[in-house]
Amino acid sequence: MRHIGVIPRFDLDTWRLEVCGEVEKPISLSFEDVKALPTVVGVSDFHCVEGWSLLDNKWEGILFKTIVKIVKPKANAKYVMFECYDGYSTSLALSDLLEDKVLLAYKLGDELLPLERGGPLRLIVPHKYAYKSAMWLKRIKFTSKQELGYWEKRGYSNTADPWKEERYAK
């Protein structure tokens, strides 16, 4: 799995995930807070924009829908921007994130997600190219307008559908 720079390092005792923006109840979660939420295990494929795939990955974490239920997005929240500890960002339509296989994952296989795979917490969006599955999550920001993330500003598709081969912006 690729990344844009140096792999960030974390102390799980001080790591935080902020969820903010167009929501009724902004929150800041510790790693223990995340793990205390209802857990799901999902198996999904992982498709790179470069043309390769990793099949049958076992992820464990929380459904993105769980966060949505907690923070209660306002009616004007149509998009979600993911900001990462390495400076990376990407955004998706909120509707894309409400599918049942979209996770905030903290385990790969039966082990805590290693740093080189995006730990302690990463987004998993199986129905999009992998650059939409942001690693090293720092902030989840609900917005009324879609913002372009790191790769999207550099010409990658904002919709990123691997079955339609949406690699580049039109």
Image: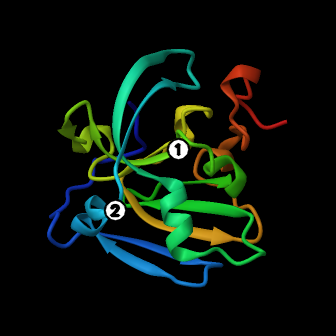
Q: Residues within 10 Å of mark 1 (few under 14, many from 20)?
A: many
Percent from the top left, x then y, of residue 109? 25, 30
Where residue 93 appears, x then y in whole percent? 71, 54
Q: Which mark is residue 102?
A: 1
Dividing the picture into quadrants, the one containing residue 114 is top left
Residue 60: name its quadrant.
top left
Q: Looking at this view, is 168 or 37 the one in front? A: 37
The alpha-carbon separation of the residues under discs 1 and 2 comes to 15 Å
Task: Tell me which corner region of the image, top left, top right, bottom left or bottom right, holds residue 147.
Answer: bottom right
Q: Amino acid at mark 1?
A: Val
Q: Amino acid at mark 2?
A: Leu
Seen at 31% across and 38% down, the residue is 117
Q: Secondary structure at mark 2?
A: loop
Task: Identify the residue position indicated by label 2 in the image.
Answer: 37
Q: Residues within 10 Å of mark 2 (few under 14, many from 20)?
A: few
Query: Which of the two marks, 1 or 2, is nearer to us in this view?
Result: 2
Residue 170 location in percent, x, y? 85, 36
Work out whether 61 lies above or below 147. above
Residue found at x 26% / y 54%:
8
Q: Which mark is residue 48?
A: none
- Which is nearer the N-term, disc 1 or disc 2? 2
The x, y position of residue 53, in whole percent, is 49, 17
Relative to residue 51, is residue 118 depicted above or below?
Answer: below
Per the image, label 1 sits on a secondary structure element best described as: loop
In the foreground, 149 or 111: 111
| Residue sitting nearer the eye, 46 or 64 | 64
Q: Quadrant of the N terminus?
A: top left
- Residue located at (53% from left, 44% from top): 102
